[in-house]
Each structure stands twice: as structure tokens, then as C-alpha cells.
Amino acid sequence: MNRNYLMFDIRRTLRNRRVMIFAILMPLVLFAIFGLTIPKDAAAGGISAIAYVMVSMAMFGSMSAAMSSGGVIAAERDGGWNRTLRLTPLKPQAYVINKVILSLLVAVPPLIVVFLFGMTVGHVHLSASQWITVALVSWLGALPFAAIGLVIGYVAKPDSMQPITGLATMLIAAFGGLWLPVDQMPSVMKHIAQLTPAYWTGLTSRSALTAGGVDTQALLVVLGWTVVLGFIALRRYRADTARA
């Protein structure tokens, strides 16, 4: 990791306020539509229904923010920035790690805002340890989406980056069960859901709401997705710099 380059990336990303506004407002609106209309005593799988929706929408916001950070890569590639980086001591691994850290940082605001909204407006009641665990696991759940954003950034053009990322985010969230519980989907859709990282990140985060604690199997699957997608992103970076 290169701290100076990371700080430069953070300042540049924060200038793109449209991305952060969408990543924060969209899950809030969805939570208000789907969560606040649920009866207070409703439950799903032993979990308060409104808490279930809150976590799902928070994950949607964090994955949207994490994936959108790949737009920086597309812009850098188009402007020849990668060619310039080849002349610096910055290693490929450090470059990719910087982008992943950046993605994790921009994934924080949507989580904080949605959880605060759920606590104050939705009256979601969790213990202090549950809030901490849910927040931490949800934050780490953004890792595979950060890697997806990197991959898209290496294959898309700057002008097509936003629609591709937006469409990918919507499809992954829809098929992964963030908008509709998987157990309410048709049988075929249930199998498709399990092939998406959103299913496993949602399962990991929501499991922190149960008495049994975090689902370690789901967490391992999330880490597996992160490793595989991170490896693909690293390969794409090396291939891109080799052509530069």
C-alpha cells in the first residue's frame, strides 16, 4: 500500500459526489419503502423483518459504493495514467490493494447512514455487540464487490463504466436476494442466488442478527469470492500495463 497515492485517490473520489449520493439515498429510499411498511412484530427466519430489510439495504448501498470505485480505474486507463505509474516504484500488488482499500472506505458511509436510519426511524433494537458485529461483517462483505469494481474498471471504457456498474449492481442485488428473500423466490432462482456473492454477503451479515452468531461457512465463501475476484483484478492490471 502507498499511503500518499491512497490519499490522492480518496480526495479524487470524494469529488464525485453523485456516486456517494446514489449509494446512500437509494438504499434509504428502498428501506423506507420496504422496511418501514412492515408490521413491527413481523419476523423472517427468526430475525426481525425490519432488521432483515435494514441489513439487506445497507449491503446494497455498500456494494454499490464499492463497485463504483472502479470508475477511477477506467478513467486512469483512458488518460494514460497507468503508463505513468509504470515509471514509478508502485508495484502492481500495491496498486490493487490501494484500490481495494479505497473501495472499503467509500463503502462505510452507506452502512452508517442506513444503520442510523434503521435505529432512529425504523426503531431497530439490537444489542451493542450485535450492532458492532453486523456493522463489521457488512463492511467486510463489500470486499468481493470492490474486486468486481476493479475488474469492470479494467475492461470498460469511462463513458460506459457507470451504466455497466449500475446494471451489474442491480442484477447482483436482485438475483442475490437483497431485495427479495431467497426463500420466497422460485426454486430455479434460489439456485441462481447461491451463485452470486450478494447471497453470501447478505447471509453473513444477517446471520449476525441471530442468537447463533455469524455464519462461518457463508463468511468463508465471501472470502473465497474475494480471493478469486482479487486475483482476476490483479491479472487484468498486469495485462493492461503490459499493453501500455
Image: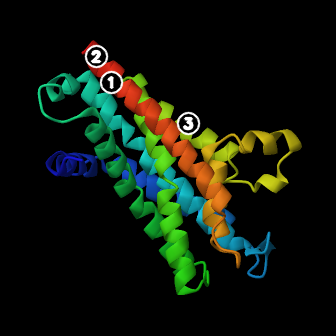
Viewer can see residue 55 = yes
Q: Is residue 140 above or below residue 136?
A: above
- Distance between the Cα atoms at labels 2 and 3? 27 Å
Q: Nearer the viewer, residue 19 or 228?
A: 228
Looking at the rendered structure, which numbered label has been put on residue 95? none
Mark 3 element type: helix
The residue carrying mark 2 is 242
Q: In the rendered structure, which disc, 2 or 3, sits on the residue that comes first in sequence? A: 3
Residue 80 drawn at (x, y percent): 20, 22
Residue 16 drawn at (x, y percent): 29, 46
Question: What amino acid is labelled 2 in the image?
Answer: Ala
Residue at the image point whose x is 60% and y is 83% from the top: 126
The residue carrying mark 1 is 238
Question: What amino acid is labelled 1 in the image?
Answer: Arg
Q: Nearer the viewer, residue 90 or 82?
A: 90
Q: Quadrant of residue 31?
A: bottom right
Mark 1 element type: helix
Looking at the rendered structure, which numbered label has been put on residue 168? 3
Callout in the foreground (2, 3): 2
Residue at the image point whose x is 60% and y is 78% from the top: 122
- Distance between the Cα atoms at labels 2 and 1? 6 Å
Q: In the rendered structure, which disc, 3 or 1, sits on the residue that comes first in sequence? A: 3
Q: Nearer the viewer, residue 94 or 244?
A: 94
Question: What amino acid is labelled 3 in the image?
Answer: Ala
Mark 2 element type: helix
Q: Residues within 10 Å of mark 1 (few under 14, many from 20)?
A: some
Residue at the image point whose x is 79% and y is 41% from the top: 191
